[in-house]
Image (cartoon, grey):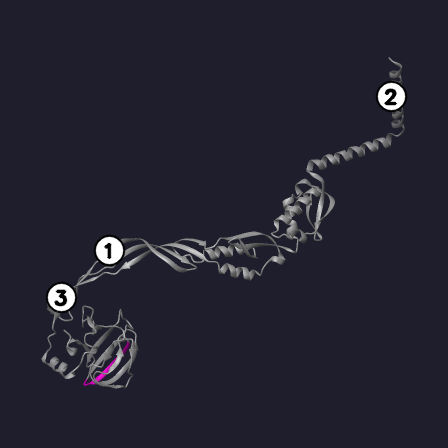
Amino acid sequence: MSIKALKEKLLSNAVLNKALRFINLNRIVVKFSAICLVGILSVLVSAASVGITFGFNVKYSDKVIATVKSASVLENAKTLAVKTVSSKDADKAISSPKLKLTLTIVDKLDNANAVATAILDNTDAIIAGSALIVDGEKIGVGSKELKDLVENRRTEFFIDGAENEASFVKKVEVKEGYYLKSEIKDTIAVEDAVKNLEVKTISTVVSDVKVAFSTKKTLTSSKTTGYYKVTTAGKNGLNRKTEKIETVNGEQEVRTVISNEVITAPVTQEVTVGTAPVKLSPAQNASVSAAGFICPLPKGRFKVSSYYGDGRNHKGVDLCANRGVPIYAAASGTVSYAGWRNDYGYNVIIDHGNGLQTRYAHASALYVSKGTKVSQGDVIAAVGTTGNSSGNHLHFEVIVNGTRVNPAPYINLK
């Protein structure tokens, strides 16, 4: 062994001997220190095992809004917050948060995105909202419900029961995000702008359409005028029509029939109509001659659409004419009624004396009133379609002693 090595060995033995003497003399102190050291190590190991770590509380607007691992997370959050706000002046609205060291759990640490959202939600000058953008131009910023308002406008003109497609005439977008309060327009103005958006709607409508049956008349001279018998009952048909309707803001622009399918064909009604003149008894002929009636409508301006009887207990004769054609008093007399009755509509009754009366119904206008005395040929009303009526015509009745009789002979109808 060299002299140098021998010296080092002796020196180490000396240090070891001194250490042993110190421990022997200070056994209690050494034992307490060892216990403390073991305790500290145990706490550190336990903390690490449950995820406890050092972090920083982020204080902003006088309250703690997040906890981060390091200052770099906060810097990234501020950058994200500024970029999120749709304004070039966003950085001026966001103040600098403060950091304070703290113990926390690793799972409770916030990332930059969460901190950015917390900063925005706690900045009074910034508000969450939705921007209305039309053809690339920002019209204004409204509430978060703006998206629903725009969708309601788009579907406003849908037709119930139809297949509907709708789109805005212009390109419309709703951009949700954060905005400076100072740059936000009045929300009512934005909502008004939504109400004025033009919407094009295309609706495919399927509807069942009734097809009215036609009537085929067979004339027979073996029966008198007024005879009317249905030999084959008519039935309405049914068509299923499919149409495409294009509208802009509910106003129809184009209507196209795509198909018209026959579901049920109509059945033609066949009737037999008598044409032989009514044979009157001598007493009836005398009554007709004594009445001396004239036709209540101008000759050549009407046609007979329904005779007395006509298979439906029709108690008068219907003279089809244009609306407004003058109605004449068939004979002189006194107006006993002029006004409205449900089935007859506007109508006039003239009392000619000796139990003889005439009625003029479905008029569009009345020119006489109760108590008016009229002469034969006076204009008393105008043709119309009031009351229970399917078209412009005069329903004319002759009433003898309270009973309605066939008017045809009285006004020389063939």
Q: Nearer the viewer, mark 3 or mark 2?
A: 3
Q: Main secondary structure of the magenta part?
A: strand
Task: Measuring from the top left, give residue 83's x and y in whole percent.
Answer: 62, 48
Q: Reading the chain from its start, which is encountered first: label 2 or label 1? A: 2
CA distance separating discs 3 and 2: 149 Å
- Bin the neighbour count of mark 1 within 10 Å (Cα to Cα): few under 14, some 14-19, many 20 and up: some
Query: How many numbered discs sit on the rendered protein?
Result: 3
Q: Quadrant of residue 233?
A: bottom left
User: Are the residues flagged by discs 3 and 2 in contact, CB closer than 8 Å?
Assistant: no
Amino acid type, residue under disc 1 in the picture = Ala
139 up-or-down from 299: above or below: above
Q: Quadrant of residue 6?
A: top right
Q: Secondary structure under badge 3?
A: strand
Q: Reading the chain from its start, which is encountered first: label 3 or label 2? A: 2
Amino acid type, residue under disc 2 in the picture = Ser
Task: Measuring from the top left, give residue 285's x and y in whole percent.
Answer: 11, 80
Q: Is residue 315 visible?
A: no
Task: Measuring from the top left, give residue 119's x and y in whole percent.
Answer: 66, 50
CA distance separating discs 3 and 1: 26 Å
Q: Secondary structure under badge 1?
A: loop
Q: In the rendered structure, find residue 12 and report the number of the disc placed on it.
A: 2
182 up-or-down from 9: above or below: below
CA distance separating discs 2 and 1: 124 Å
At x 88%, y 30%, the residue is 26
Amino acid type, residue under disc 3 in the picture = Leu
Q: Which residue is mark 3?
A: 219
Magenta range is 346-354
The answer to whether residue 100 is magenta is: no
Q: Which residue is mark 1?
A: 265
Q: Nearer the viewer, residue 105 or 366?
A: 366
